[in-house]
Image (cartoon, rainbow, N blue to C red):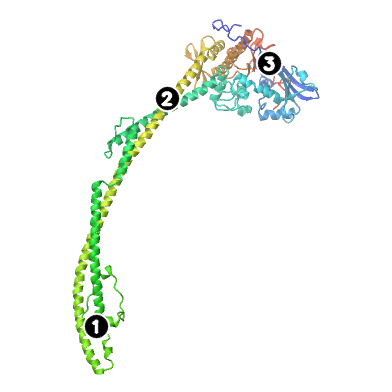
Amino acid sequence: MELLPEIPVPNGFAKPTGSDEPLFWIREIRFLRSWKDGKADEIRRIQFKKGLNVVWSPPPKSDAVEQRIAGHASGKTTLCRLIRYMFDEPKMGNDSFRNSVNHRFVDGFIVASVRLNGESWCLARPFSPLRMPGGLSARLESLDQFLQSDCECGTYADFRRELEKCATKIVPVESLPSGEALTLRHFFPWFTRDQECHFSSIHDWRQNTTSETDSPLLNKTEKAIVMRSVYEPNIFREVKLSARQGELNASLKNGARLQDTYERICDEKLNMIQSHEYADMPDMSGELFVTMAKARLNEEIDQARKNPPDVQASLDKLRQALRDAEHHYQNLAAAYNATVNYVESLSAEIKQLRKQSQQTDDEELPPPSRVKLISQSMPDREYCCVPRSIAHKRGCHIGDEEEFSHDPYAAAEARKVIMATRKNDLAAKIADYKESYKIAQHELAKVRLARSAMEKADSDLRDAEYAAVRASQDRVSALSIILSAVEDYEKTCHALTDKINELEHVRANHKEVSAELAGIRKSAKGKRGIVDCFAHVIKFVLGNAVVGKVVETGGDITFEVSYHDAPYDSAALNEVETIVFDLAVLTLSIQGDATHPRFLIHDGPRVSDLTENIYRRFFDYAKYLEDRADGNPNFQYIITTTTPPPEEFQKIPYLRLQLDSSTTEGRLLKCDLS
């Protein structure tokens, strides 16, 4: 079969290259009610071949009630799920299906003959996981030999380990760009799309909430990367480079913003330094500006902490004036204190004389003013501490009457003389007291003036010292601000230099990454890739007037389809795009331009309002791929359908199984699981 006479294709298009079989595929599957001691109670066996395999459940032959669901609930989707289960999908269906099967086939098994990486394997997995957890496997050609009681079998884990190695044959990387370990389970849902996904989008592989397959959950972008990886070997590298390019773009943008900020700060700091009048700055254009400016400012700060000569001379003069005032005050205070002491001694003598002369204090003598501020008077005493002989020599007559106590007359006369003498002495003392008091008051006035002068000198000195310290602090503060600005300018300049160097490195890295990324993309466009293949396949399915294009943007995959140069879109077209994409990738792998394992299952791909003439083209294209292989196709394509396939596909070798849900025997497991 030719693709279409009007569709030119390259000579090698869809021509098998390399291996003559898929990376893995199924040759036979059997369902057993029981398997014990080499005896197998078989429910059904189905043989598959390389190339196209059709599983068909015909529509009802009449409108009778028992015939209306003849094409549905017959086991097509169940068969697909059980095939996937044999290829290590964790679950063979949802809870409802598993519970029904476990109940009906407690001792049942699914056995299959498969090919994996050029080797034959026979597998057995129980319907009920309680019967035999995991399952069995053996490297054998024949299921009949595998089912014998004397067959030496290993565990299913042996097959699982070999199967997992296929992931590196599909894509030679170990992890997704997100860092998640990459396994075959990330690819398998795409190779075996579930019916519940309705083929509405290439990103819909499984409805995990319905089929409960526990497949890895990938977002839309991750699914696109997984699909692209089989026909673009460098996609993981491209994705990483693209992400790195985005990071570098952000770094360049942020770096440029920071560079502008640093340059603005440098200008502001320079203007601030230049505007200060406190310091004589060196040439700001010189390379050693910062070093010279810091040295000069530190020197000026040290000088500012000292008083200028004129200020120091003024302070010295004020300090000398204070010392002079203090000396003058001390001299006057000493003289005053001496006078006060004398006045106080007179006061004591006057008291004593009045007491001795038996005279009352008819005249109150004022005490000296502010005596206690300068000197503390001695306490009054009732006796004299001066010996009598010394007192007589000094003119004291106290105690003279004792000398005449033996002669009463003489004593009386003596007392008169003594009393007269004492009165005279008292009058003289009082006169001396008053004169001395006046002198003390005069001296006190001088002391007060001297004290005021001293206090003023002290105040003037303190004011001058405060003004000098304040002026020094103001100058040091102003110079420190300039020094801080110079240091900030220096730091900003260093940061600016570092940022410029960093940006140069980022630009070089960005240039390198962009060049490598451009090379990868150019290489992908230069080879016969998915774009050309998708265009050929969609023309085969929809006609020569249809132009289809695969668009890969931002890691995603989309399609642009036009009919007679006008955009074409519908629900049915979405289904066609999905199936055509899968067939296009399969074709690329057939001809050696992709790493798809060439194992593909489409479960009931006719959905929406897809017309039969378009639907049949899927079968025709699969036969075209077989014809291109000259009888030895290197792919396996299993398609289940309720819609009748084209007549030539309703029989051997294409039709591998025909089901009918209207009868028990016509169902896959020959029983009603509802």
Instruction: Identify the secondary structure beneath mark 2.
Output: helix
**Crowdedness near tag 1: few (<14), some (14–19) or many (≥20) residues, C-alpha within 10 Å:** some
Q: Is residue 79 above or below residue 482?
A: above
The three-letter amino acid code for the residue at tag 2 is Glu
Return the residue at label 2: 504
Residue 88 image position (x, y, % from top left): 67, 24
Of badges 1 and 3, nearer the viewer stands 1
Q: Nearer the viewer, mark 2 or mark 1?
A: 1
The one of 227 and 57 positioned closer to us in this rendering? 227
Where residue 144 appears, x then y in whole percent?
77, 18
Q: Is residue 344 visible?
A: yes
Badge 2 or badge 1: first in the primary sequence: 1
Q: Which mark is residue 118?
A: 3
* Amino acid type shown at disc 1: Arg
* Mark 2 nearby-residue class (10 Å; few <14, some 14–19, many ≥20): few
Q: Are marks 2 and 1 in contact (CB under 8 Å)?
A: no
Q: CA distance from mark 1 to mark 3?
A: 149 Å
- The secondary structure type at the circle numbered 3 is loop
Q: Nearer the viewer, mark 3 or mark 2?
A: 2
* Residue 230 shown left or right of residue 107 in the figure: left
Q: Residues within 10 Å of mark 3 (few under 14, many from 20)?
A: some
Are the residues flagged by discs 3 and 2 in contact, CB closer than 8 Å? no
Q: Which residue is mark 1?
A: 354
Q: Quadrant of residue 383?
A: bottom left
Location of residue 593 by image quarter:
top right
Q: Residue at x 57, y 26 (%)?
A: 218
Tell me where residue 464 appears, x and y as whole percent.
25, 52
